[in-house]
Amino acid sequence: MDLCSEHGIEVPDELYDIDDLTPFAVEYQYDVFTPPNKELFSRSEALERVRAVHSWVLSKINSV
């Protein structure tokens, strides 16, 4: 998301926090990482966030 901002691509506020998932992407995927506050992490909410970003990216690509 930082790269988008650096290149003048406006990122919707509701999508900007997707970076929170970056450091642990592999660990989350393979169920290796257990967040200290596991009850605060929701895989379904994370999936919704990823789908929203994916849709936004596709809309940007299709508008070029």
Image: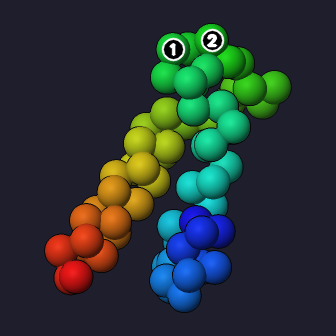
Please tell me whether residue 61 is drawn above or below residue 7 in the rendered image: above
Please tell me whether residue 19 is drawn above or below residue 32 in the rendered image: below
Q: Where, by quadrant of the figure, is residue 41 drawn?
A: top right
Q: Residue at x 57, y 32 (%)?
A: 25
Q: Residue at x 42, y 50 (%)?
A: 50
Please tell me whether residue 5 is drawn above or below residue 28 in the rendered image: below
Q: Amino acid type of disc 2?
A: Val
Q: Where does the image place residue 2, in percent across and percent down from the top left?
A: 65, 68
Work out which quarter of the rendered image holds the N terminus and state it: bottom right
Left or right, 18 with respect to 62, comes to right
Q: Where, by quadrant of the figure, is residue 22 drawn?
A: top right
Q: Is residue 14 visible?
A: yes
Q: Residue furthest right?
A: 36
Q: Where does the image place residue 64, in percent across and percent down from the top left?
A: 22, 82
Left or right, 61 with respect to 32, comes to left
**Which residue is nearer to you in this view: 43 or 31?**
31
- Crowd class of label 2 (few under 14; some 14 to 19; many from 20; radius 10 Å): few
Q: Amino acid type of disc 1?
A: Tyr
Tell me the number on the disc at residue 7: none
| Residue labelled with disc 2 | 32
Tell me the number on the disc at residue 30: 1
Q: Residue at x 68, y 18 (%)?
A: 33
Q: Where does the image place residue 30, in percent across and percent down from the top left?
A: 51, 14
In whole angstroms, how far apart are the C-alphas of marks 1 and 2? 5 Å
Query: Which type of secondary structure does the marked residue at label 1 adopt?
Result: loop
Q: Residue at x 33, y 57 (%)?
A: 54
- Crowd class of label 1 (few under 14; some 14 to 19; many from 20; radius 10 Å): few
**Which residue is nearer to you in this view: 50 or 36?**
50
Give yes or no for contact between labels 1 and 2 (Cβ–Cβ under 8 Å). Answer: yes
Q: Where does the image place residue 4, in percent across and percent down from the top left?
A: 54, 74
Q: Is residue 13 visible?
A: no
